[in-house]
Amino acid sequence: MTTTDRDPFILDRPTARRLRARDAIICVLVAVVLLLLLEGKSIRRSGERMEPGIERTIVLAVGKPAGWLADRLPLADAVNDATAWLSPDEQVTDGAGAFQTPPAGVDATASRSGGSAPITEDAFDRAALGEPPQRLDRLATLLVTGDSLAQPLDVELARRLAPQGVRTIREARLGTGISKSDLVDWGQLSVQQTRERSPDAVVMFIGANEGFPFPGSAGTQVDCCGPAWAVQYATRARRMMDTYRRDGAARVYWLTLPMPREATRQRIARAVNAAILVAAQPFRSHVRVLDMNALFTPGGRYRAAMPVGGRQTIVREADGIHLNDAGARLAADVVLGRLRADFASLGS
Amino acid sequence: MVFPTIQFAVFFPIVLVLSWALMPRQHVWKPFMLAASYLFYSAASPVFCLLLAGITLGNQIGAKLIHRSDDARTRKRIIAVVVALDLATLGVFKYYGFFATEVNALLDSVGLGLPLPLAAIALPVGISFITFQAISYSVDVYRGVLAPASTLDVALYISFFSQLVAGPIVRAHEFLPQLESPRNPRKVAVGAAVALIILGLVKKVAVADSLAREIVDPVFGVPQAYAAPDVWLATYAYAVQIYCDFSGYTDIAIGTALLLGFVFPQNFDRPYRAASIREFWRRWHITLSRFLRDFLYIPLGGNRGGRWRTARNLLITMTLGGLWHGAAWGFVLWGVIHGSVLVVEHVFRGRVSMPRWLGWLIVFHIVVLAWIPFRAPDLSLAGTYVSRLVEPGPATLWTLPVVAVVVAAIVAQLLPPRPLERLRIRFERLHPAALGASMAAAIVLVASTVSTQGVPPFIYFQF
């Protein structure tokens, strides 16, 4: 290290051309107008996806008129078509399996007409009946998915299963939720993941972005977190479980939510956890509900640290929602225990 | 608030127009810019605005007391207290968890059951940059480089939104004089600003985030699952990713400041063309390396006092520089590697000569390999990662776009700068409306490469 006489400044370069402040404003405003015309729909969509608050209000105040204008001009669609090849994502907001589409072979009127749904053998976990578990031979492909809660659990599982030759696909979709389908429709995504990956086991950890209203009948909406909301959530979760279990060819490990710190989020977490338990009932032979609440927040009381190996250890992130690395290791222990019970290739 | 987001795209044009409209009335402009900067910071967490205000007031009180005192010892005591408070703030928020965990483990291992209380403390965004700028102000006043500025000016200096969360670390004596009079509305480097903003967006969104998604995150997450070809490519890709991510942020920061009439120091100068580590640090995160030089290395004695003392000072400076990035042993090791190579270079300077290309090749690979402990989640995984560098196996993640981007980003730093300079000059001569249209086109193209996950935070936000 040496002391230098002077630090370089951008404008010391002799070629920097200087204009007026008015030109700076013209330049930025031209860019803004073009972006409103070309990206108006995206701005509106982004605003709709945001959590309620002042930021959302401001973005929507700009996005709604811009979106209205973009709807009436062909520019946005032309630009979208021209740049679609650059996008790293596939469309997962509508299409086969989407929540808006009724699942094939399901009689939507059955429950409304008062008829009871048939109970099948799939509803019983053999272990709970005292029978030897029905183990699958080999775990070749594991899908770890969900929202941000799936991280860093996905990495932890991938690392620990790598020596056994398990291919772990990590697919956390940040900012998504089962109760919000505008960013990712989990009904469609679960179908797509199953079709493309054919996982032998699926670990699902989702629920950090729930609590959004579901569409009700006649244009109404079902707000969180009463029984009506839980019914809708459980219905969607059950469709996903049914997709992931692949008629019994795969096992599903659905983690419940450890209680978050904030009271408003706790209310949502309770509804989500109750819905997960109900959703899994018909598929107990293939779907394991892993209770993270009992592990991390027994009695439903939030705690940032807990005893691990005889020593107090922080297991939650500072946001009071997510698990940190130490917490993810504990969650992975639980998941691996159940995986070993279900797959012969992992030993016992 | 993050630069490449819709929120910022709404925020900035409003601030730009109002800033120039209010500029002639400084008594209105300054509170307005301060409010805008606090609004920008509050998007991360409103509570931490109180911390920002507290750091500002603490340093301003210290600076005023230093200026009033004629006694050298009193002045020294005050600056020591102010700097200690700044570092304590940094320590509590950034290092307490790490420190408590390590001390508890140590006490436990020797059978002393005196655990320190554990707490999950949220890290305020940009705390390292904020405290360093605050220290810069107090020390500049202590050294007589500056007279204390008004509290409003100091608050604006520390919170100015363009550089608030990830630098560049603008020194007080560089920024405060720019607040003494209104910025000249006839001398705004619009072309240079737009060029920097476009370049920054492309680097961050199109290059850094794509490499992270396609190769860096998968391989660094589970190195056990990959063999040498993928691991080597991920290593080079991370070197490109961190450069494009951080320098992209800096480009946007400098560009937005230029549009508002402010000039920030350069932070990067094609670092991967360095043929020595000493040269690397004159090209990489320039504002941090000069801060460490002026506030740590030189006060420790610098290169005065002989070869061994210089070596010690280099090692201490670089180790603490590593620790500045975060509370993890990987950062410490990264600092130790750089410090050790600096020591070796210092010892053998003038004794060993080699062709520049060979020096470049060696230094480039030292820098690239030193990023491994920096990026790996812990030292154990860094070890696993290194072991996979020699593990034979297939290349599963090699795709033409990834390889092309990595090679192009490295080669671009080695090329002579003149052709790019010529291109930049021609771009700067465009009409303002054409500059705006270019910026819009760049944003549309870059936005189409963003995944549904959105734009990940800049890597240096966590520091």
Image (cartoon, grey):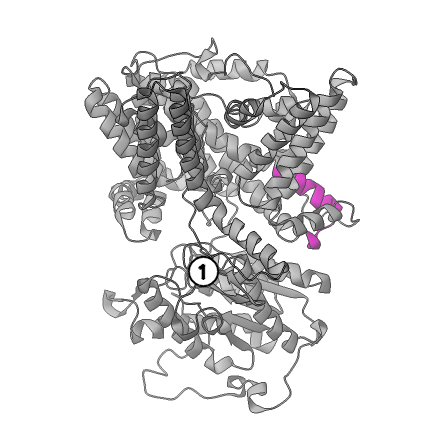
Which residue appears farthest toward the top when viewing the image?
A14
Q: Which residue is mark 1?
A: A95
Q: Is residue B230 magenta?
A: yes
Near-viewer residue (B356 or B432): B356
The picture quadrant where one finds residue B107 is bottom right
What residue is shown at x 66% (from left), y 37% (from top)? B370
Residue B435 at least partly seen: no
Front residue (pair A39, B106):
B106
Residue name at image x 49 percent, y 21 percent: B266
- Location of residue A135 with respect to B406 vertically, above or below: below
* Tag 1: amino acid: Gly
Q: Picture quarter containing residue B80?
A: top left
Q: Chain of mark 1?
A: A
Magenta stretch, overall SS: helix
Whether residue A283 sits left or right of residue B137 in the image: it is right
In the displayed structure image, the side of residue B337 where residue A54 appears, left or right: left
Spot occupied by residue B182 in the image (x, y as percentages of width and height)? 27, 16
Identify the residue at horizontal 47%, vertical 88% (top origin).
A119
| Range covered by the magenta-colored residues | B223-238
Of residues B31 and B340, the one nearer the viewer is: B340
